[in-house]
Image (cartoon, helix red, strand yellow):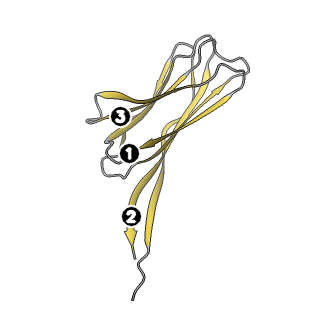
Amino acid sequence: MPTTTTTATKTARTLQASASNAAAATTTGTGLDVTTKLGGVATLVITNGGTGPTIACDAILETSRDNTNWYEFSRQTASVTNSAVATFNVLVPESVMYLRSKFTGNTAQAVTVEAYFQELTAFSTS
């Protein structure tokens, strides 16, 4: 009897390249089309400077059905600790059509933000 092997294909995607989010600003990534994908894991990272913000930055993941109207899917808040790095992982189901990241809320100090998506692209059998 032949043996069947199933292989998962995964793709690393960038939702937001490393950038500075100024105090009282919002950094929004470009929408990612995942209409033909099988879900994945989004990783959102906030790094405080040597002096942390007065109010912490929020890491937000948004979804859309049309890549125009966006709705909050997940929100986590970093700390205000000096030089702290907050990493948040969010499981994104296969039913999501479009995905993007947003960072906002920090006051008094800038923070560094970035977001990535580990996409489950396909399964194949051999």
Q: Quadrant of residue 83?
A: top right
For image coordinates 44% across by 61% down, the residue present is 9
Amino acid type of the residue that numbered disc 3 sits on in the rendered structure: Thr
Q: Is residue 27 above or below residue 31?
A: above
Total number of numbered labels?
3
- Residue count near mark 2 (Cα–Cα under 10 Å), binned few <14, some 14–19, many ≥20: few
Closer to viewer: mark 3 or mark 1 = 1
For image coordinates 34% across by 39% down, the residue present is 98
Q: Secondary structure at mark 2?
A: strand
Disc 3 versus disc 2: distance between alpha carbons? 24 Å
Disc 3 versus disc 1: distance between alpha carbons? 11 Å
- Residue count near mark 3 (Cα–Cα under 10 Å), binned few <14, some 14–19, many ≥20: many
- Which of disc 2 and disc 3 is earlier in sequence? 3
- Going by the image, does 96 lie left or right of 8? left
Amino acid type of the residue that numbered disc 1 sits on in the rendered structure: Pro
- Which of disc 2 and disc 1 is earlier in sequence? 1
Kindly indicate whether the residue at mark 1 contacts the one at mark 3 (C-beta within 8 angstroms): no
- Which of disc 1 and disc 3 is earlier in sequence? 3
Kindly indicate whether the residue at mark 2 contacts the one at mark 1 (C-beta within 8 angstroms): no
The x, y position of residue 111, in whole percent, is 61, 23
Kindly indicate whether the residue at mark 2 contacts the one at mark 3 (C-beta within 8 angstroms): no
Q: Secondary structure at mark 3?
A: strand
In the current view of this chain or complex, which residue is farthest to the left? 66
Would you say residue 103 is visible in this rendering? yes
Name the residue beneath numbered marker 3.
Answer: 63
- Quadrant (top left/top right/bottom left/bottom right) for the N terminus: bottom left
Amino acid type of the residue that numbered disc 2 sits on in the rendered structure: Phe
Name the residue beneath numbered marker 1.
Answer: 93
Name the residue beneath numbered marker 2.
Answer: 123
The x, y position of residue 52, in whole percent, is 68, 18
